[in-house]
Amino acid sequence: MIQDHIKQKLNKKFKPVYLDVINESHRHRTPAGSESHFKILMVSHQFSGLKALERHRMVYNILEEEFNHGGVHALALNLYTLKEWEEALQVELISPPCVSRKDK
């Protein structure tokens, strides 16, 4: 599977803190079972100090073979440093207040 191959290559190169490769081919005009459109969510220390364009180029360079000969047509890239990822996820989860039976 192309999806698994992409995961292996990205894991090997970037040693990500988090990686999710999602096949979104079904959302496009492709035959059933296609592996041509992917969304990649990756958190890696290797992205520190790099602009988004530089990060994207790194991923595209690693997956050059998949574009040229593997049938991959498009990638949606969401690439973060660990700090950026933690800041993006800073949502305070507040539990609703408990109401004991005697408070009712």
Image (spheres, rainbow, N blue to C red):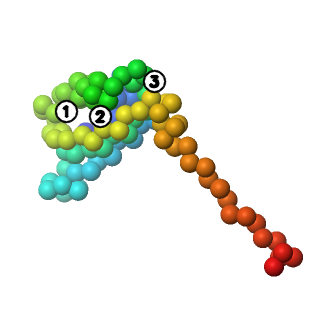
Look at 52% across and 38% down and name the residue there: 87
Q: Residue at x 27, y 42 (%)?
A: 76
In the depicted view, which residue is nearer to us: 86 or 39?
A: 86
Say above or below: 5 vs 61. below
Amino acid type at image mark 2: His
Q: Mark 3: which amino acid?
A: His
Report the residue marked by disc 3.
45
The spot of residue 3 in percent (x, y) is: 29, 41
Q: Where is residue 30 in the image (x, y as percent from the top left)?
A: 15, 54
- The quarter of the picture where residue 45 lies is top left
- Chain-order first, disc 2 or disc 3: 2
Q: Distance between the residues labelled 1 and 2?
A: 9 Å
Asked if 2 appears above or below 94 in the picture, the reply is: above
The residue singled out by tag 2 in the image is 5
Q: Which of marks 2 and 3 is in front?
A: 3
Residue contact at pointers 1 and 2, CB within 8 angstroms: yes
Judge the density around disc 1: few (<14), some (14-19), many (≥20) Cα neighbours within 10 Å: some
The amino acid marked with disc number 1 is: Glu
Question: Is the residue 45 above or below the residue 36 in the image?
Answer: above
Give the CA separation, mark 2 to mark 3: 21 Å
Relative to the observer, which residue lies in front, 91 or 29?
A: 91
Query: Few, some or many C-alpha atoms within 10 Å of disc 3 (few <14, some 14-19, many ≥20)?
Result: some
Q: Residue at x 19, y 44 (%)?
A: 36
Asked where in the image residue 69 lies, by quadrant, the reply is top left
Residue 71: percent from left, percent from top: 15, 39
Q: Could you say which disc has been placed on residue 55 in the image?
A: none
Give the side of residue 18 with respect to residue 70, left or right: right
Q: In this view, does 77 lie to the left or right of 43?
A: left
